[in-house]
Amino acid sequence: MALVLADRVKETTATTGTATYTLAGAVNGFETFASIGDGNTTYYACVDGTDFEVGIGTFTASGTTLARTTILQSSNSDAAVSWSSGTKTIFCTQPAEKAVFRDASGHIIALDGRNLTNVDAATLDSVDSTSFLRSDAADTKTSGDLTFLDNVKAVFGTGSDLEIFHSSNINRIQATGALYLKGTPINLYKSGTAELMASFIQDGAVELYHDSNLKFSTSSTGAEITGDLTLTSTDDGATENPTLDLYRNSSSPADSDVLGHIVFNGENDAGEKIQYAEIESRIIDASDGSEDGRLVFSAMLNGTNTNYYSPSFGSNIFFRDVFLSQSRNIIFEGATDDVHELTLTSADVTADRTITLPDATGTVLLNESGILNLTNSGSQSEVRLYCESSNAHYASIKAPAHADFGGNITLTLPATTGTVLSTANADVATTTTSSSDADHVLINDGGVLKKITPTNLGIGSGGGGASNLNGLSDVTISSIQNNDLLKYNSTAGEWQNTNLGVTVDPSITFPASVFASIPTTVTVAPSSGSYDNAAYFAEVRNNANDTTLITDANITKTATSLTFTAPSSTGSYKLRVKAQDFGDLESEFVVSSFTVGTPQPRYYRIYGSGGNTHTEVKDIEFFTNTGQGGTKYPDAVGHMTSNTAPSPLVASSSGAYSTSFDNWKAFNSSTGDASSFWNLGNNSTYSDWYVELDIGVYNVTLQSATVMAGRASGIFYGGTQDLIMKSSITGAFSGEETTLGTTSNGGAAGTFNIN
């Protein structure tokens, strides 16, 4: 935009008020303001015979207007005149206050009194802009140096914001505020040489040199330092300085994010760069207030990067063997921080040794001068000696109960080879039918075992006694049959035989499928007739039926069912069950085979991430195939009418606004109902929500989904969000889940497919 003066420019205008002048055309014999040029300014005067206005105006060709940019003089106290109706004349003029002229003394002066003293036309004759530097124009100096002596400054800016000068032996550039250097590239050299000290490359690296050697260089992925890096702090206080801070400033931190690495690289004998060791940091749990982190130390082993150690999950985890060097110990402080410690040390071994700890909870026995002390925490101490066949059976030596003790006792084994007799294994001794073979008979006298001769017992030739139960004076045996028992008849004052019968064998019915590590319920019933009040003994064994895997104590029983958690490995197994009905003897074992398969996910969630207020979901459909193909869920079972109907479907979420917008309304397929949608609750996290469908079975796999976001009216308040489909076998969704697909709603309502 330039200030332009033109001769004989005069037009009329009908503009009223103080608005921009609209030009109506040239007066006869004059030019229009088009001579000024579009966007340029000029001096103007406007009159109507009564009022006047002089100023600087900006001409616009489009609309042929002249803006009242600056008012210099007017009949309205030098302010813009508010014109009344009627035609005014507007023309180019030369305002007196903008004029420069020679006075009577030949001086060039301005109206404000400034002048060029003793300058006449001869003085300025033939002088142009190449002969001097002007303050108001872009001039070029064509020859000769522009020299500033010491401490004479080249000053730039209204407030002397930038100074360039030489002081003593120092060249200075001093700036107030930001200092911008622009170039492609910007290089710093050693004085008087071509030795590069620093280089700043456009859209590229920043390089710093030491004595011509590159030491620091940036790249699009970070920076590289050649040589040693030393962090030094001169802080003499107690703060932690110097500090190496590796900060991953993520806008969306998540569990399992890798925070940073410290990598140790070197060459191999083939000249290849190899990572020999690494320290890695990860986020385990990014939840506010319960954050967990993890460090992993790894090193190369046989050409493979191998984890060795990790402080994480509240423990120190070792992934490889721990080797303690010569004469090193493991020392435990114990429960109290005091001067007493427990030291675990090794003898000076003469060969490689292995100590195997048991697969059990307990206390390690110690040899104290040849004595093994087996203590306990409230139950009788017991030693179990297992057989040689997969530890299938054991013989136990158990201490008596406290009430049976009269003091400490010692059981001394005989110094001969043989088998110790007990009340349950008398048959291991040689059998005889002659009482004359007995020198003594052992009897229990008030808890004391004593020996007595057969004669003293009345045993021997002609010594009396009965050869069968019926020969005893207080026993009557009649109509003997299998499974008879003796019972005492107090009326008759004698023992009589009776038959209680045998419980009918149970019948076992398994569900259609059994899945690894999943609770399984089988139906149990009598194979015929009915039970009065049956009790069951059950256990799960391997397919060979010689090893118990799930004990009776770990099986939950009712009158008609047995429930247990299936083995964690797939394959074939046996369930063996026996029953005892009220008043009858136990049945025989019934063994039923079953197969454990791999479970498919049962729980499916749609997550929303990035929302900023309430989120509404009209409907969700899951599909057994990708690309929204195959069987639909919940349609295959039925549209949901509550959070638990139809069975076995269960709907849940991170929180619903109210029961009017409950979880199941995301699965009822009623997309046209204005109030039939799930709405995120007030107290829920807007940016991390989920809606879940438990399909109740483990033999169906869902692979894609369709999410209808928003209300039936098309309104959606949730903002731009990522919609994520995840599945879980356990329903925990605590790291074991699988992410099946992600899409974005673009911040609007609509139907969105996730694959």
Image (tube, helix red, strand yellow):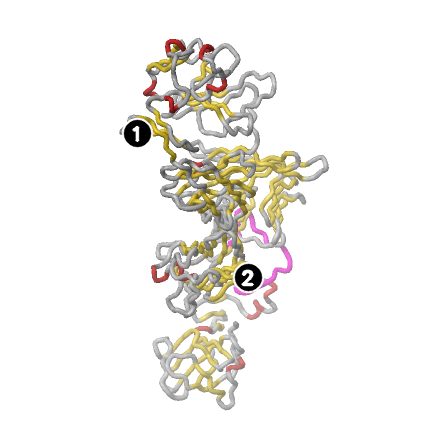
Asked whether 740 or 23 is in front, the reply is: 740
- Residue at 43% x, 18% y is 373
Which numbered disc, 1 or 2, marks the residue that appears first in the sequence?
Answer: 1
The residue type indicated by label 2 comes to Gly
Residue 739 in percent (x, y) is at 52, 52
Residue 315 in percent (x, y) is at 47, 34
Q: Which residues are magenta?
A: 136-155
> Circle 1 is placed at which residue position?
489
Asked whether 577 or 607 is in front, the reply is: 577
**Which residue is the extreme one toward the right?**
270
Residue 13 in percent (x, y) is at 43, 85
Q: Is residue 630 above or below residue 329?
A: below
Q: Main secondary structure of the magenta part?
A: loop
* Residue 33 covered by magenta stretch: no
- Residue at 43% x, 76% y is 68
Q: Is residue 71 above or below residue 380?
A: below
The residue type indicated by label 1 comes to Asn
In the picture, the disc for residue 630 is 2
The quadrant the C terminus occupies is bottom right
Position of residue 205 in the picture relative to residue 363 (left or right): right
**Which residue is the extreme one toward the left?**
491
